[in-house]
Amino acid sequence: MRGKEESMAKLNIVKVGDDTLRKVCRPVDKITPRTLTLLDDMIETMRDADGCGLAAPQVGILRRIAVIEVEAGEVIELINPKIIAFAGEQEAEEGCLSIPGRWGVVHRPKHVTVRATNRDGETFEISGSDLLARALCHEIDHLDGTLFIDKMVKEVK
Ligand code: ZN
């Protein structure tokens, strides 16, 4: 049980240089109350840091979980996400809460479709274009230990 005063907790964001960010995360086999708490805390942490996405390894948890909020109030929770289709190309600047102060141009698909599990254990698919497609790719990359600085074609100041 969690008391009201600790219903949400802000987590520490791991910064680049920490090995945690370079590990391949394991799938979530079973959704437990701890999984749900982690999702809630990740959303709180992402919002507090003014981010539009956060992956579990960024808070030190090596599990395939990510949250995205590119439209305020529309949080996407992803458990075991996989890109199942992509099309087109876009080039845009990206940053990362784990790499403060750095921005770079990254090529991503313009449209992606992701299959994932939600907090109720149901499989769903989400398709996104432009910023949402980029966020989906960026967060799923984190689950495989890949950072945007590995893919950027140009650093911007
Ligand atoms: Zn990131």
Image: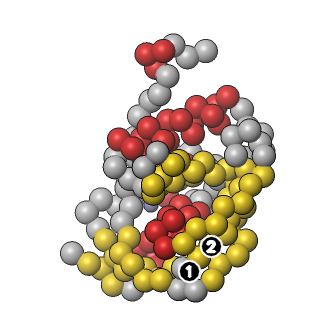
Residue 65 drawn at (x, y percent)? 61, 50
| Apparent side of residue 5 relative to residue 114 in the rendered image (left or right) | left
Whole-angstrom CA distance, mark 1 to mark 2, is 7 Å
Give the colour scheme of this rendering: secondary structure
Residue 126 drawn at (x, y percent)? 66, 61
Is the residue 72 above or below the residue 90 in the image? Answer: above
Total numbered labels placed on residues in the image: 2
Residue lying at 42% horizontally and 49% vertically, measured from the top left:
72
Residue lying at 78% horizontally and 46% vertically, measured from the top left:
122
- Disc 2 marks which amino acid? Val
Is the residue 38 above or below the residue 33 in the image? Answer: below
- Which mark is on residue 112? 2
- Which mark is on residue 67? none
Tag 1 secondary structure:
loop
For the residue with label 2, is its CB less than 8 Å from the closest atom of ligand 1? no
Residue 4 drawn at (x, y percent)? 48, 15
Residue 25 drawn at (x, y percent)? 64, 55
Is the residue 63 above or below the residue 39 in the image? Answer: below
The residue beneath circle 1 is 109
| Apparent side of residue 100 relative to residue 62 in the rendered image (left or right) | left
Question: Is residue 25 among the parts visible in the rendering?
Answer: yes
Q: Quadrant of the C terminus?
A: bottom left
Q: Are marks 1 and 2 in contact (CB under 8 Å)?
A: yes
Q: Quadrant of ligand 1?
A: bottom left
Tag 2 secondary structure:
strand
- Disc 1 marks which amino acid? Pro
Is the residue 110 above or below the residue 75 in the image? Answer: below
Residue lying at 58% horizontally and 86% vertically, measured from the top left:
88
In front of the other: 110 or 102? 110
